[in-house]
Image (cartoon, rainbow, N blue to C red):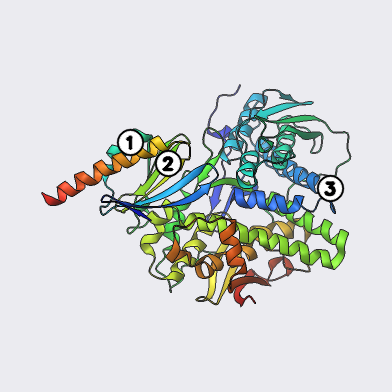
Amino acid sequence: MVENEFYTWVQIRNCRRFYKRYYTTNFKADQSLLGLLEIFGLLEVQAFSKYAPCALDAFSIKLESEIDISGALGSEEIQVTILKTAPHILQAFENTLIQWVKMQQQNALS
Amino acid sequence: MNKIDARNILRGDFYKERSAYIAAGEPGIFHCHHYNCYLQAVLLDTKDYLPNIEQVLVDSAQEVAYSQFQAFFQNTPDLDIQGRKHTVTDYFRFAGFGQIDLDRVDNKGGTVTTNSEHYGVSWKLKFGKSNQPISFFTTGFLAGATEAIYGLALGTLNAVQESCLAMGDKYSQFTLSISNSDRELTASPQEGVFQTGNLPQPTNTSIDYEAIREALIHMPIEGAANGLIDSFGVLLTRHYANYYCNISYRFLNLFMKSMGTEGLNIATSLLIEGGRVCAFNTFGGVMQSNEWNALIKPMIKTREDWIHGIIVVVNALGWGIWQVEDLDPGKRILVKIQSGYESNAYLKKFGPSSLPISFLAAGGVAGLMNLVYALNLPERAPITLDEAVYKKISLGNDYFVPTQIKCRAMGAEFDLIEAALVRNG
């Protein structure tokens, strides 16, 4: 596990071409996070709460086969599947996540 | 070309009372690239003893594709040739088999070229480069579907694969021509001898079976523009239940004929191992997926709920109605299966069996127990599930092995699979 002041992550091998990372923050994903992440691709939401009240609505943002960001509204975990040859996109995602966490930290203080 | 409307698009329906997807008479089931490639690799490994095994893979695909599209086209008589070709290519993409076009194919044959095809892509991902073409399913599919498009008899066409993505070729290419061999192809058993029943709701778990299955069967899982379904960390297919059954049971028969009783034991062990590999990768991938975290994990209170969570998922895969009959945590599980796709097909195609034949189910149940108890995935996730981890489980102290206690193909009312803990060494 790798840890910094904004999040922790664990990486697993997905297949030969991809890594999969599990990021955890101290904040639950919300619409403001989706708003920031939408620059990475097409947003799809699975409204699982329609079927079970305790289930969370899952989201997925894909940019062709380069990055797939997924999570659930109300969950602190975000999964990122990233092409090994696209570290610049992963860096951009991490910058966005840090930006959102900072916003959440400020909101918590105010 | 016909106007494209809903009548010309083949999708099929999910039948809750059977936990089965049916599209133009053919049961469809979800399986991932690990199982598809592993099962095929196991069969190909025997080709020194069974020289016809590659043809079995091709013929089995030709039979199911022909049967499905012939049935569909009988019910859509207004479709012209272009409309029929669109139906086939669209279904191939929808099912996650890849992206094809049939523009250079007619009633005497032709060629099909693709740069995105499930087996070619998957094989290279899983095993690295192949030294021979390996897309046997697609080879047979193209022949069978083209026969149905042109109203030809099953077996009229023959297909061969000329180049293959798995070999590092830029394209996979298939050539179809009028067959001059005397292969004996038979129509698919289609829906087989199926049963109906209710989805169980065990009282000893907080997992909501009905809610989860409803959510899963309404997920839009289909091939992307490249014809592949990249989901749950694997490449999924909406495959043909009868394809797996055809290749598995023909393999079993060939092995028995070639090697007698000893061959039977080896063949059944290999097929069950295929189920274990499937569980390890598919169930393991599902348990570490975002969908699991969003939909199922909020309901989980105990480690046994992880078992129930996967059993519900299985009830949405088209494999039949699965139910935990008994669970002794960490020691033993009994799973009851009604309308299992293996028994459904076997009974229709071969009649009663003298031995248990639910190999995928047996391996799957044991594989599930290995994930939850031998590997302890609930407390270790997320972890990389690779061959090293699989080997470690298999050689570890605690390991679950399956026994099929009851089998519908042998006359029982349902299939009953036990997986019990054994200690190595």
Q: Residue A68 got which mark?
A: 2
Of tags 2 and 3, the one toward the viewer is 2
Q: Nearer the viewer, residue B203 or B236?
A: B236
Q: Position of residue B7 (x, y in %)?
A: 56, 34
Q: Pick whichever of labels 2 and 1 is earlier in the sequence.
A: 1
The residue under label 3 is which amino acid type?
Asn
Q: The residue tagged with tag 3: helix, strand or loop?
A: loop
Q: Which of B118/B182 is in front?
A: B118
Percent position (x, y) of residue A46? 38, 46
- Chain at tag 1: A
Work out whether residue B233 can be spotted: no
Give the chain letter at badge 2. A
Q: Give the quadrant of residue B158.
A: top right
Do callouts 1 and 3 mark residues in contact (Cβ within 8 Å)? no
Q: For the residue marked with disc 1, what is the amino acid?
A: Glu
Q: Which residue is mark 1?
A: A38
Dot 2 amino acid type = Asp
Whether residues under marks 2 and 3 lie with C-beta atoms below 8 angstroms apart, the answer is no
Residue highlighted by disc 3: B52
The C terminus of chain B is located in which quarter? bottom right
Instruction: Tell me the element at label 2.
Output: strand
Neighbours of disc 2 within 10 Å: few (<14), some (14-19), many (20+): some
Q: CA distance from mark 2 to mark 1?
A: 11 Å
Label 3: few (<14), some (14–19) or many (≥20) C-alpha neighbours in 10 Å = some
Circle 1: is it few (<14), some (14-19), or many (20+) Cα within 10 Å? some
Q: Are marks 1 and 3 on the same chain?
A: no
